[in-house]
Every structure is written in structure tokens, then in C-alpha cells.
Image (tube, helix red, strand yellow):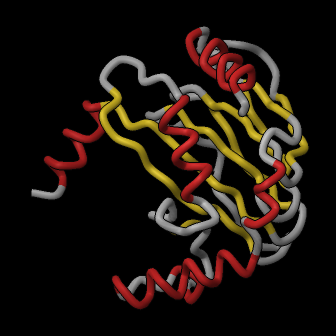
Amino acid sequence: MREEFWKEVNEARAAGESCLWKNAFPEANTLDMNCLVEVNQYLATVSGANPLAYQHQTMMSPVHWDSRVKPIFAEFISNFNRQGTEIDWNSFFFYSTSDEHQSLNLHGDTESVFLIQGYGDVGMVTYHQDKPGKTIHHMETGDAILLPPLYIHKPIPIGPRVTLSLGSVPKHYQVAQDNMNR
């Protein structure tokens, strides 16, 4: 279905490059505010977590079990080549309920991050810590961006938004998490 796309993603990933693909996932239009609220309701019911009730919360996880996310997640894990010690997959919704909703600060994740824009628009600031200059990507529904490990990024919501974040977690990160939970 998207064989050439996944080939490009894995080539960019192997080269340690960030890359944006416009309208790569048109079906992401189903990842909207209704989906966000329904996922929140499920998480509240089964775990007691209620991310939408917390004013400063900007994410919820896991989300890959939802019927709208599951096909995208399955395609991701079937086509995203594991590298090094990656042993697990994760899935999050990052969201903003208005353009005034604060999002995350500039940061770099220890895992590769693959973002798919669902509802709304986001300005995604990215830069490599060893290269000059920042880039601002305008992400719209269906767009996808690859962020290699420790690639610095910050979302700037342009209004209400839902962004699907998929990642591949390296073993050293998982071991550190396990040790912290002892």
C-alpha cells in the first residue's frame, strides 16, 4: 500500500535524518476530538486515569488498541525497521484543546518518534543539536514526521489538535524504566 513511503522512512531513519511527508496518512482524519474523548473515556474506565480532567495534561497513552488507531499502528510496526536494541513499541495521543493550551517544551526523546497529525494543525519546531538553525514544519491532518532519537522538537498548537505519536523503544531505556519502578 505505502511501500515506497516506508522505504523512504527507513532510509531517512538509517541516515539519522528528520523528514516530513505531506498527507501520507489521509485516514488520520478519524483521529479527531471525538476519538480523543472516547479514548479518554476508555482509559478512565479501565485505569482510573482521566487525562482530559487535568488542565496541564497534554498526552494520553496507550492508544493503539482503539479501532481508528489500530490499523495505523499495525502498519507502523510491520514496516518501521527496528534498529539496535529496540524491543518495544509505544503509542500516545498528544493533544491541545485550544491554541492557548500549552504543549511540551523543546526536548529530545531517547527513542525514534514518528508523529502523524490527526485533527488540527501544528507548527513543529525541529533541529539537530549539532547543526545550526531550526526548522518549523506546518503539519496538517495526514502529515507525518520522523524524529530520530534525541532530535530536538516542540509542537506549537495552532488550535485544537490531536497528534498520534508512535515510537520504538531501545532496551537501555526500558531497563532504566524497569529499575526506576522497583
Q: Residue at x 54, y 49 (%)?
A: 73
Relative height, residue 50 to residue 108 (above, below): below
Give coordinates of residue 159: x percent, y percent: 88, 68
x, y percentage for residue 42? 48, 84
Residue 148 falls in which quadrant of the image? top right
In the image, residue 13 sits, relative to residue 20, either above or below, namely above
**Relative to residue 28, is residue 63 depicted above or below?**
below
**Relative to 30, is 105 on the left or the right?**
left
Q: Quadrant of the N terminus?
A: top right
Question: Which picture quadrant has residue 5?
Answer: top right
Q: Quadrant of the C terminus?
A: bottom left
Corner quadrant of residue 132: top right
Image point 72% across, 81% down: which residue?
34
Give 143 or 159, whichever is nearer the viewer. 143
For the point 42% across and 24% down, which residue is it?
82
- Residue at image coords 72%, 30%: 2
Q: How many marks?
A: 0
Q: Position of residue 120 (x, y in %)?
A: 86, 63
Query: Outermost residue, front direction?
Result: 1
Residue 122 percent coordinates (x, y)? 84, 53
